[in-house]
Image (cartoon, rainbow, N blue to C red):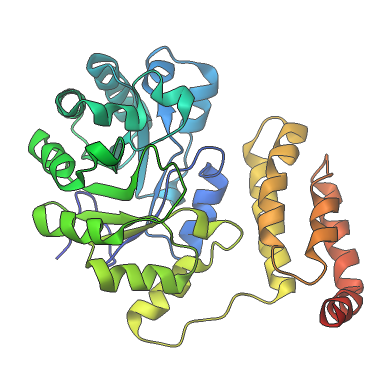
Amino acid sequence: MNRFPFPVEADVPLYLAPMAGVSESPFRRLCHRYGADVVVTEFLSAEGIRRENPATISKLRFGADEHPVGVQIFGAEPDAMGEAAALVSDVFHPDFIDINFGCPVKKVVRRNGGSGCLRDLDLVQQVIRAVKRSTSLPTTVKIRSGWNEEMRDPVTIALRCQDAGATALALHPRTRTQMYTGHAHWDEIAAVKQALDIPVIGNGDIKTAEDAFRMLNETHCDAIMIARGSFGQPWIFNQVKDLMAGIPMRPAPPVEERFAIALDHARMVQGYEADPTGAALEFRKHLGWYVKGLPGSAELRKKLHAVTHFDEVEAIFTNYLANRERFTEEQEAA
């Protein structure tokens, strides 16, 4: 039986995490194609939404092939969060609204947004209730384990979120002060899963499909949210599904197919972004992720990180394939 507040077919849904500058529409669509069950927009400012800031509103575009898709919003003013949720629901029609209580970035936290809210659990509940009152869509939340080690109490935070009306909860089991250092305490995901009645989504330290499968077995979470593990390998979702189905995991695509996927991703970005040069510059990071680990990848990344137009990418890939044997021999000799 589907325990999630929106239609999803998988018993254990796989989420693409909301990531600033990464979880844009083309990448969301690509990850859906390669097995992601649910995608979430990069986090968007409630103030930017309610003031209809053009840069913010432009990130609220998504196509029919992205559903189920959630819009993640952040802010520390309950009324503003409610207004933003209402506008997003009425105008853009996502499948759910997600509240960001997890972002550790200083410019967000200094305004008490993101994980900054975790210093005041009454405020957390006020924000959730304001959003719930303002939309008929399901309201989900993403949290960290606390502000710092002294305030680390993910079960209490999660229970407060559930009591305020959250319909699903994702936990990244690090504190805000940890940022992305140390390791994610997956045992805290298991504890939150035991404590809550709503679905719990596990997140943190998933770099490979095997990591995701291990998280599922160790925590018994209801869903898995993959962030950095998707960088340059959107096929990770299908690999996780193979492991969950008990069948041999499909290998990573060969280099020719990997390049074809990268080029397809680039074309999707070209069709989505209005500024082709700016889009090409922003896409450099994806190109670097796609070629990570290949023989001669340092030299290849150097060329890709210098591109200023998408047309340059295919020529660089073609040249690499023509000289692949040399790169392989050099790697083996090193």
**Residue 320 sits in which quadrant?**
bottom right
Q: Residue at x 46, y 46 (%)?
A: 180
Q: Where is residue 124 in the image (x, y as percent from the top left)?
A: 20, 28
Residue reaching furthest front? 150
User: Vertically, is 120 above or below 219?
Assistant: above
Q: Which residue is drawn at 83% across and 39% down?
A: 308
Q: Which of 325 and 218 is in front in this view?
A: 218
Q: Position of residue 110 (x, y in %)?
A: 41, 20
Q: In which quarter of the image is the C terminus?
A: bottom right
Q: Which of 197 and 7 is in front in this view?
A: 197
Q: Nearer the viewer, residue 63 or 26?
A: 26
Q: Where is residue 209 in the image (x, y as percent from the top left)?
A: 45, 71
Q: Residue at x 49, y 63 (%)?
A: 207
Res. 11 visible in picture: no
Q: In which quarter of the image is the N terminus?
A: bottom left
Q: Where is residue 51 in the image (x, y as percent from the top left)?
A: 42, 12
User: Vertically, is 205 above or below 217?
Assistant: above
User: Vertically, is 116 above or below 321?
Assistant: above
Residue reaching furthest top? 51
**Residue 75 sits in which quadrant?**
top left
Res. 101 visible in picture: yes
User: Vertically, is 60 above or below 130?
Assistant: below
- Say whether residue 47 is left or right of residue 327: left
- Say whether residue 270 is left or right of residue 204: right
